[in-house]
Amino acid sequence: MHQALYRKWRPQSFSDVCGQDHITAILRYGVENKKTSHAYLFTGSRGTGKTTCAKILAKAVNCESPVNGDPCGKCAACLAADRGSCIDIVEMDAASNNGVDDIRQIRDEVEYLPAELTKKVYIIDEVHMLSASAFNALLKTLEEPPAHVMFILATTELQKIPATILSRCQRFDFRRISSDVIAARLEHIAASEGIELDHEAAFMLAHLAQGGMRDAISLLELCSGDNRPVTTSVVEEIAGTGVRDVIIKLLSAVCDKDYDTIFGEIGKMFASSKDIAVFWQDLIGFYRDMLVVKSTKNSREYLDLSERQYGELTTISGRFASETLIYHAKLLDEALVSMRQSSASKRIIAEMTLVRMCDERFSTTNEALASRITLLEDKLKSGAYRISTPSAQNDVAQKIVDAPKPEAGEKRADGAAYKSSADTEAPVKKEYRQLPYWAELVQKCCERDLMLGSLLRESAKGFTVNTDELLHIRTGNRMALTIITNMFSELLEILNTFEDGRLTANDVKLEYVPEKKDDKNKALDELAGASDEIN
C-alpha cells in the first residue's frame, strides 16, 4: 500500500527534525538528564513539526536506552510506538473530541498505571478547539498529574488557549522553517526516492510551502506524480505558481502605461477562473518586498527568495520611487477591501485600480501628490527635466509677477479706469478678501488639469484687494508658483469663465508669500530655486 511521502519521511528522532534546533536541543537535554516536564505546549503554524516532536518525545521518555536524548528506535517501547499499537501513548484530536466528557474520560484514566510503558503520554492536537467547560475539566489534572503521566498539547492558535492552561505548561514556539532548509530536505528526499528535482524548483516548492515542511513534501509528491523531472515549469504548471511572472509583467505595464497588457493579463486570469482576490494578496506581498529593497540596507536578509527572484525584484523595484510604492500599496489595499465587501466584479475593480496606478493624475490624494512631486524632484536633480516655456509665455509670466502698477486714468479691458493714489485723501488699509468662487474655480481646474487643480487646492488662495482692481493668487510654495506660472494661460481661461471673459494677463497677479515651513517644504523650495537657476 502506498504511503504518502510526508508520512514516510516523518522524522523519527530529534536529530532528524529540521529548522527547530532551539526546541529539540532542550527536549533532548531533558530526556537525557531525566528532567522532563509533566505538561508541554507546542505552538506554531502548520507543518512545522509540532506533532512530530510530540511523538518523538513520547517515544523518548519511554525508550529503554535513549541515545543522547533521542529514542533508540530498536527497543520494544520504540517499536510499539512506531506501530501505533501502544495503548499508553494516546493521540487525541480536540477538533472532533472537544467536549467535557472527553476530558473527563482522560481524567479518570490517568489514575491507572501504564499497561506497557513507564509513562502514559496524552498528545492532544488542536487543543484550542476544546470547549470552555472541557478546559476547566483539564485544569486540575494538568497542574498536578500523577508521576507516570505526561501531557503534550499542540495548537496553531495560541491566542485561543486560556491563560490558566498556559501557566501550567512548558511552552515551545515552533518557527516557520526557512526556504533554504526546506529545499535541502526536499533534494535529499528526491534523491532517495529517485525523483529528478531541479534546485530552483526545490526552492520554489519551499517558498510556496511558507515555512511548512509537510506542505513542501506534499507539493513535491504532487509535482512528481507523472514521473517527469520536477523543474520550475512543472511546478508552475501543477501548483499554479506563475503568479510572480504575471506580477512582474503587470508592474512593467504600469510603469510603461501599457494598458493593453493590463487588461490582457487580468482578462486571462478571469477566463481561467482564478480568484483575483488571492492574486491581489500576492501582489500586495510583492509591494512589501519592493519596499524592503527600497528602504533597507541589507534587504537580502529580510527576503526569503532565490537569487533569481531577488534579482528580478531588485530590477523592477528600481523603476519605482518609495512614495510611489506607498501610494500604490494604499490603492491595492483599498481594492482588496472592495473585492471582499462589494458584490461588484473583482475583475473591474482590479482593472480600474491598475489603470489608476499608471497615472497619479487620476487621484487627488496626498499620497498621489507626494509621488508626483518625488518624480519631479528626481528629474530636476538628474537634469533630465527642465521647466521651460515658449518665450512668449515666459514674457507673459514675467509681466504677471513683476507687472508695474497701472497709471492713473489708464483704461482696463472693461473700460473702467484704474484709480490714482491722488484720488484719495488718506491712505487706505489694504484688505484681502478671498474670491467667492474660489472653490468652484479649483474644482473646474481639477476637471480640466488635475495637476493645476491640486496645486491650487493645496498651495494657493485667490483674493481681491480693496486698493486695486487686480485678482491676486498667492502661494507660499516656490515650486507651486513656478508650475502655476507655467500654466497661466490655462488658468486665465478658466478664470474668465467666472469673470465673463473680461480679464487679461495684466488683471491677474501671482504672488509668492513666504510662510513658516517644515523641513520638507524647505527642501521643496530649495529644489524649486535650483530649478529656476537651471533655466
Image (tube, helix red, strand yellow):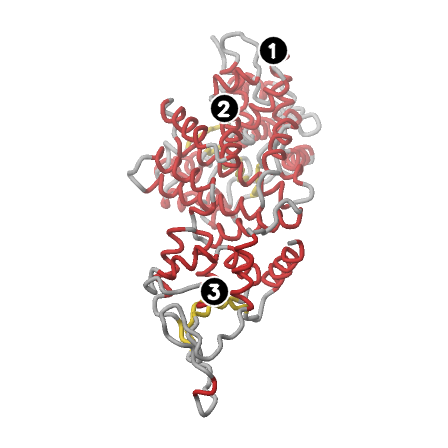
| Element class at badge 3 | strand
Residue at the disc numbered 1: 196
Which of the two discs, 3 and 2, labels the residue nearer the N terminus?
2
- Find numbered disc 1 in the image and state the secondary structure of the residue it sits on: loop
Q: Single out the residue that lies furthest toward the bottom.
A: 425
The answer to whether residue 309 of the structure is visible from this angle is: yes
Q: Are marks 3 and 2 in contact (CB under 8 Å)?
A: no
Name the residue nearer the viewer: 459 or 326: 459
Q: Against 448, is 173 above or below?
A: above
Q: Which mark is residue 241?
A: 2
The CA span between labels 1 and 2 is 19 Å
Three-letter amino acid code of the residue under disc 2: Thr
Label 2 element class: loop
Packing grade of label 2 (10 A; few <14, some 14-19, many >=20) is: some
Please report the residue visible at 28 percent of the width from the left and 38 percent of the height from the top: 343
Position above or below: 251 against 77: below
Screen quadrant of the C terminus:
bottom right
Q: Which residue is mark 3?
A: 460
